[in-house]
Amino acid sequence: MRSIKQFEYSRGIISENLAQFMEDRDSSIYSLPATDGLVLSTAQALSGCCIAGGAPLAIFTGEINTIKDWDLFFTSKAAFSKAQEIFEERKFSRADKSRFSIAYTKPPAVVQFVTRRWYPSIDEIFDNFDFSVCCVAINGQDICYTKTSAKHIKERKYNLIHTEAADLCLKRIARYGEKGFFPSEAFITSFLDL
């Protein structure tokens, strides 16, 4: 299958074929619940759409049973509109709308369409994340990450990248603690300096 490159990326982002990546780790995306598999395959096939954050992190670590939702990012309004159309055709129901996202669900899968803005590159998506371990994305048939995110995932520690929503950050610290990830010393120092 030809890899669809939907997002550009540069600054040291590593890209590997997702199927090979999973095989190398004795893991399988085929053990996903059917509706989660549908989310993954649909997003992989859509031009101008990628999955980033917690779900790709769970795939990266082989902990796919911990996926609670899928965050989809788009390059344009047209890509977003096409994704809405396809997910609705596949019987996902619109569940919620906030200032920055629209949620669709088809239990047990929850999909967050990130609408804060359009992202022309993976770099820009990663630049807007709060924690270094979240800098993992599925772009077409590839999994993308940075050397720093891979190192922090291996160490089960993270640094603070973006401090815009410090109050939300506290909730996420607890959530990532439940997943076995903890703030690094640099994170704690930067957080105390806020």
Image (tube, rainbow, N blue to C red):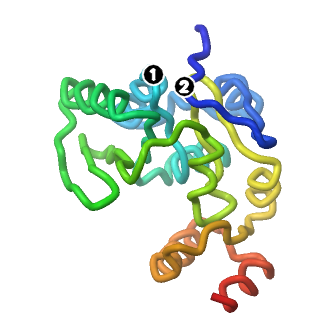
On the image, numbered disc 2 is attached to which residue? Answer: 6
Q: Where is residue 76 in the image (x, y as percent from the top left)?
A: 40, 34
Q: Determine which quarter of the picture holds residue 159.
A: bottom right
96 horizontally vs 191: left or right: left
Q: Is residue 103 above or below residue 13?
A: below
28 horizontally vs 98: left or right: right
On the image, numbered disc 1 is attached to which residue? Answer: 47
Q: Name the secondary structure under disc 2.
A: loop
111 horizontally vs 23: left or right: left
In percent of the image, x 45 and y 22: which residue is there?
47
Q: Name the secondary structure under disc 1.
A: loop
Quadrant for the C terminus, please: bottom right
Q: In this view, does 50 lie above or below 153?
A: above
| Callout 1 crowding tier (Cα within 10 Å): few <14, some 14–19, many ≥20 | many
Three-letter residue code for mark 1? Ser
Q: Position of residue 59 (x, y in %)?
A: 60, 42
Q: How many labels does the image show?
A: 2
Q: Position of residue 100 (x, y in %)?
A: 34, 57
Three-letter residue code for mark 2? Gln
Q: Determine which quarter of the picture holds residue 123.
A: top right
| Callout 2 crowding tier (Cα within 10 Å): few <14, some 14–19, many ≥20 | many
Instruction: Work out which residue is located at the far bottom of the displayed protein and give it.
Output: 192
In percent of the image, x 77 and y 30: which residue is there?
24
Q: Is residue 174 above or below residue 118?
A: below
Q: Where is residue 114 in the image (x, y as percent from the top left)?
A: 38, 49
